[in-house]
Image (cartoon, grey):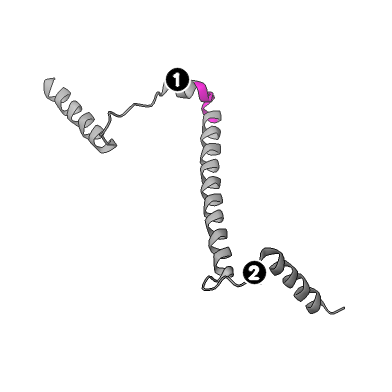
Amino acid sequence: TDGGDSRSTTLDQSNSWLGADTDFGEIDFGLFVAIVNTVFVSIDVTCAILLAQLFFFHVRLRKLGTTTYKYLSDNPTRQLPRGSSVSVLKEQEIQQVVNAANDT
């Protein structure tokens, strides 16, 4: 058999199975599938980046010779007051340093 015929038959079967041969009116089904795939790929890439960050963080912890629990216990995260931002907190810290320098 010719390779082109088999590919054509497989394509027709997959289009029929996916419903690509049905009439969606104004909606291009191929474009819809491409958009959905793009959304899933972007989610996958985001997850892969976050997992890589977590992996390298733990590699760094291993090099420091500490555990995750000990790291979190030694470096507690600071809770921001409601309505404040990190930049406001930094400005307050700078002001405290300036005030402490002026007091000496």
Q: Quadrant of the C terminus?
A: top left
Q: Which residue is mark 1?
A: 73
Nearer the N terminus, badge 1 or badge 2? 2
Answer yes or no: do the residues labelled 1 and 2 have beta carbons within 8 Å? Answer: no
Nearest the viewer among 18 and 42 is 18
x then y, percent, for residue 86 = 29, 36
Amino acid type, callout 1: Ser
Q: CA distance from mark 1 to mark 2?
A: 55 Å
Q: Quadrant of residue 11?
A: bottom right
Question: Is residue 58 shown above or below 3?
Answer: above
Residue 20 disc label: 2
Residue 23 sits inside the magenta stretch:
no
At 52% from the left and 56% from the top, the residue drawn is 39
The residue closer to the viewer here, 25 or 10, is 25
Depth check: give the residue in front, 79 or 71: 79
Q: Quadrant of residue 1?
A: bottom right
